[in-house]
Image (cartoon, grey):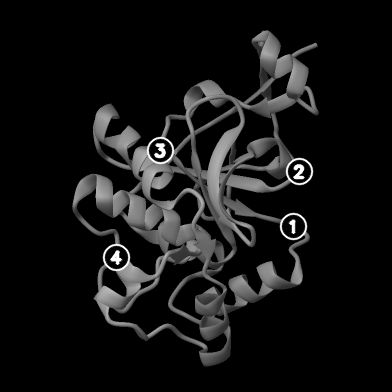
Amino acid sequence: MKRDSADRPVLCSRDPGTAEKWDPPPYLRAIATRKILPNLTQLHAGDLLLFRSSTPSVVRNLICKWQASQEFDEFEASWHHAAIYLGIGFAVVEATGRGVRVNSLRDKLHQDILVRRHRFDGRQGKSILDAALAVWLGARYDFRKMLRMFLRGQYVGQWREEEKQKQNAVICSELFERSYALASRETLLDTKERIACPAYLCKTDKLQDVEVGWVCWD
């Protein structure tokens, strides 16, 4: 485990440091594309995974620049994507341009990862995942919200709350925020006007960082 300059426990893809020896189950051996992986046994169903890339795309750059233009510091603004861990293997649920789907963490192991966790017990924590799958799986990605963020430079609550609830579309970080709200009956946001961007999920003290190490095998 490497400590970032912000003294946060980041899984650094470029410099994993010391990895523990591990004997992975046969199914992981079969589907793994490399012999060094995050220690998946330290992850819980419903954990938030934040991602950043050393070579971000144009869209990822726009997200990071927009976040930096808000009140977020350099570390917080560097995270451009969010997903929820399913609790088994490499499976995550996330909102991408294709909508809310179950995808593989394998495709993201070239990026840095920050793991954050709710402060609930195990049953409530799993209900975050249940809400994401039951309510949002198959929903559209909210391209309109992303465009408004970039064009206006800030998010100031363009829709009334009831209009937001009718809209069957989310961005990646909203998927976690809204699932958290359904599971806990409380919001992660400090004002109704705020958007739950990746930087906000990195910053909020309602979630706690989780140290996850690397494992390897012969």
First in sequence, mark 2 or 3: give its number. Answer: 2
Q: Residues within 10 Å of mark 2 (few under 14, many from 20)?
A: few
Q: Are marks 4 and 3 in contact (CB under 8 Å)?
A: no
Is there any visible trace of residue 192 in the rendered image?
A: no
Image location (x, y in percent) of residue 175: 43, 55
Amino acid residing under circle 3: Gly
Mark 2: which amino acid?
Arg
Q: Secondary structure at mark 4?
A: loop
The number of discs equals: 4
Q: Earlier in the sequence, mark 4 or mark 2?
A: 2
Q: Nearer the viewer, residue 45 or 203?
A: 45
Residue at the disc numbered 3: 46
Mark identifier at residue 189: 4
Label 2 sits on residue? 14
On residue 54, the disc is 1
Q: Is residue 13 above or below residue 87?
A: below
Q: Dot 1: few (<14), some (14–19), or many (≥20) neighbours within 10 Å? A: few
The answer to which of 124 and 1 lies nearer the viewer is 124
Looking at the picture, which amino acid does disc 4 mark? Leu
Circle 1 — which element? loop
Indicate the secondary structure of the residue bearing disc 2: loop
* Label 3 neighbour load within 10 Å: few <14, some 14-19, many 20+: many
- Seen in the picture, residue 103 relative to 154 is either above or below; the reply is above
Residue 1 location, x and y as percent? 59, 33
Q: Pointers 4 and 2 in contact (CB under 8 A)?
A: no
196 to 1, vertically: above or below: below
The structure residue drawn at horizontal position 74% and vertical position 15%, both measured from the top left corner, is 29
